[in-house]
Image (spheres, helix red, strand yellow):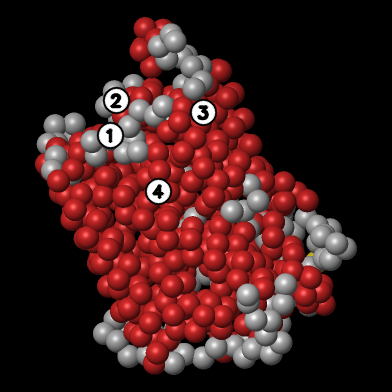
Amino acid sequence: MFPILEQVPIPKPTPQLTTAVILSVAIFLIICVGIGFYMLRKAKSWDEYAIGLRDIGPAVTGLALTATWMSGWAIFGNAGLSYTYGWSGGWLIGIMNGMGLAMCCVLGYRMRRYAGIGARTVPEVLKVRFDSRLPQALAGLIMIVLLIAYSVGQYKAMAAVLTVAGVTGGGFSGFGAYGDALFVTAVLTWIYLAVGGYAGTQLALAFQGAVFLVVGWIFGIWSMFWAGGPDKIATAIAAEKFVRPGGAATPVSIGGYTAPLAPTYPGYDWIGVTAVLFMFMFMATGFPHNIARFLGHRKFSKRDFWVMIIFVILNCITPMMIGAMGYAARAMWGGQLMGDWNKPLYGDAAAAYVSVAMGGPAGAGLFAAAVYAAAVSTLAGMVFIMATNVSRDLIFNLAPKTSGMAQLWITRIFLIPWILLPLYWALTAPPPVLSEFMAGSAVAQGGIFFFVVAVSMYWKRATKWGVVAAMVYGFILTLLHPAVWMPLWKTAPVPPFNHWGQWALLLMFGCAAVYFVVSLATKPMPKEKLDKLFPAK
């Protein structure tokens, strides 16, 4: 069915390729904007804008959840990992997607109860849960910082596919035509978020998740045949040398294969691998843009719940399909993509080059739409969270008399800086290996908010001071991430801050320890208030 190509040059941009990619991306974004305007009828008041009419079904919820989860990390970062690090890159491709999202579906379901008693944002769940404004405001601030960093990766994924397609020189932004295209993307994303609100965003996310699911599966399977089949790819990968300057041979192996890696890489050793497994378990529920997908769904029957789970499972496999494209690229082109000619994309562009080599302009256009589906969906979910963090969790928190209409317009206005700030970061200082960069924010969000938000909805004994202490601890540890501190050390760094796995485990389980110990050591909420939050079945 698929031809086996022995010698395939790395594709070069052509006018036809550029046109196909721009056209595909334009059609995709126009559909998203159209969805936003269609759902304007469900976003006329603040409550409707924030959580819709609470009538969203299981298929839309499942696809929207996987869309916010399968970000630029999944569709570009995973191919970049497998291409850059070979088999050792496989530890971050997402083997725990299914478990993490399944846990999110179970724990996140209780979000609907809190929406029913006044919560309109994820941090406001904490206000309702602990009858205190402090944890709400602190959570809102920390979420903004972590989500800005995570948003950068979405723009790099979009920039990579545009650059590969030849959307480069000229332009009005000062960053070339691809910078112009990203700016237009940011504007159109703002429009559909501003007019469609939560319900419009949720439906657009479902559309994006469906595009990502179909295209990811097709191209992942196709790439394995295109590169000669799994056996040929495995042989080629085993013969490759994956060298990271200053690295040491990792004991993590598959089939006897090891790769020289730096301690700041998550798969450096078994400590790092263990941390990755827990990261994927915690972050699916810890991501505020993930768990917020449950604020506006309708009450599910058992059948509805399993419909949602089926869509989640199908899309959980998609990142592995994208990872296969990175292995196919390494088998066909060796380490050529790591040359200075491909700076700053390097291995992160592997999947885009494979899509062009396999499918020509049409294949590149289709894959570009999938990249945008993954990146724009996560970007939109995070930007919406950050804007409501300002309007609801900070301003309304401090000034409760702020009207609903004022909150609505404040949210629409604050969508703008949270869309543009990470865009500027991505254009001026893009991270060299996307997934490695994103993993820092993922650990922080998972380690902090899995316990602070998700566990608190189920554990009666949790206290306000327990969640506040966990958030402060987790944020301090985030600032000690190896990527931040490694360049500052003039001599040998002091563990664990030069070792990603030790740092990640210390953050995640340190948050857990602080959360439980401080909660048990402080006074719980009054029984009559807890009975309202945890009614007898």
Cα–Cα gap, marks 2 and 1: 9 Å
* Viewer-nearest of discs 2 and 3: 2
Q: Report x, y in % for residue 175.
A: 36, 82
Residue found at x 39% / y 79%: 21
Q: Are marks 2 and 1 in contact (CB under 8 Å)?
A: yes
Q: Earlier in the sequence, mark 1 or mark 4?
A: 1
Q: Nearer the viewer, residue 100 or 138?
A: 100
Q: Earlier in the sequence, mark 4 or mark 3?
A: 4
Which comes before the other along the chain, label 2 or label 1? 1
Left of 4 or right of it: where is 53?
left
Circle on res. 54: 1
Under mark 4, the amino acid is: Ala
At which x and y percent is residue 301? 41, 27
Instruction: Name the residue at 47% across, 14% down.
Output: 523
Dot 2 crowding, Cα within 10 Å, few <14, some 14–19, many 20+: few
Identified at 51% across, 28% down, the residue is: 455
Inter-mark Cα distance, 1 to 3: 23 Å
Would you name the residue on which mark 2 appears?
116
Decide: few, some or many residues near mark 1? Use Cα within 10 Å; few <14, some 14-19, many ≥20: some
- Judging by the rendered image, the residue that carries numbered circle 3 is 455
- Where does label 4 land, which residue? 64
* Residue 45 image position (x, y, % from top left): 14, 39
